[in-house]
Amino acid sequence: QFVESGGGLVQPGGSLRLSCAASGFTLDLFAITWFRQAPGTEREEEREGVSCISGRGSSFTTYADSVKGRFTVFRDNAKKAVYLQMDNVNAEDSGIYYCARQVGPTSCVDNTLRNPWTHDNWGQGTQVTVSS
């Protein structure tokens, strides 16, 4: 199970660090993906993949084009946590952010960010609102 935290209200251009705490399984064995649910959407299938970090000791990461150069994903397996550092945020970054583990490949693959249905152990999410 995951528990996300760190969300809140932030001004455009500001920064936030989201945390995703894992329990009940060995975090390092899995690729972990951050998704976000934009305002006005409800279905899990509508969640947008933001960033993925590979498991099993790999440092390979992927990012959605919309966040490249602004967001950074990293993990601390000893603390059983994955983080998403969000810099220079804008209004389009608003939404509920979830982390989930990829079922199957232990690395981020081409379609990881497009397929929320290949993930499980979703947390409850953390709300990010970017507004002045």
Image (tube, rainbow, N blue to C red):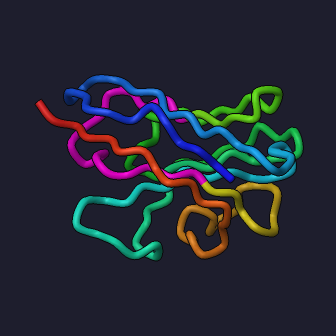
Q: Which of the 4 quarters of the picture holds residue 131?
A: top left
Query: Is 21 left, or right, of 126 in this rendering?
Result: right
| Residue 116, horizontal then vertical, whole percent | 56, 69
**Figure quadrant of the C terminus:** top left
Query: Is 48 left, or right, of 92 in this rendering?
Result: right
Q: Which of the pair 2/36 is nearer the observer?
A: 2
Q: Name the residue rendered at 25%, 32% in the picture.
A: 9
Q: Which residues are magenta?
A: 84-99
Q: Which of the pair 124/104 is nearer the observer?
A: 124
Q: Which of the pair 80/112 is nearer the observer?
A: 80
The residue sitting at the top extreme is 14
Q: Name the residue rendered at 62%, 50% in the picture.
A: 52
| Residue 101, horizontal then vertical, whole percent | 69, 57
| Residue 60, horizontal then vertical, whole percent | 73, 43
Using the image, determine if residue 27 lies above or below residue 33. above
- Taking the magenta stretch, the answer to whether it contains residue 110 is no
Query: Is 53 left, or right, of 39 in this rendering?
Result: right
Using the image, determine if residue 83 lies above or below residue 93. above
| Residue 51, horizontal then vertical, whole percent | 55, 48
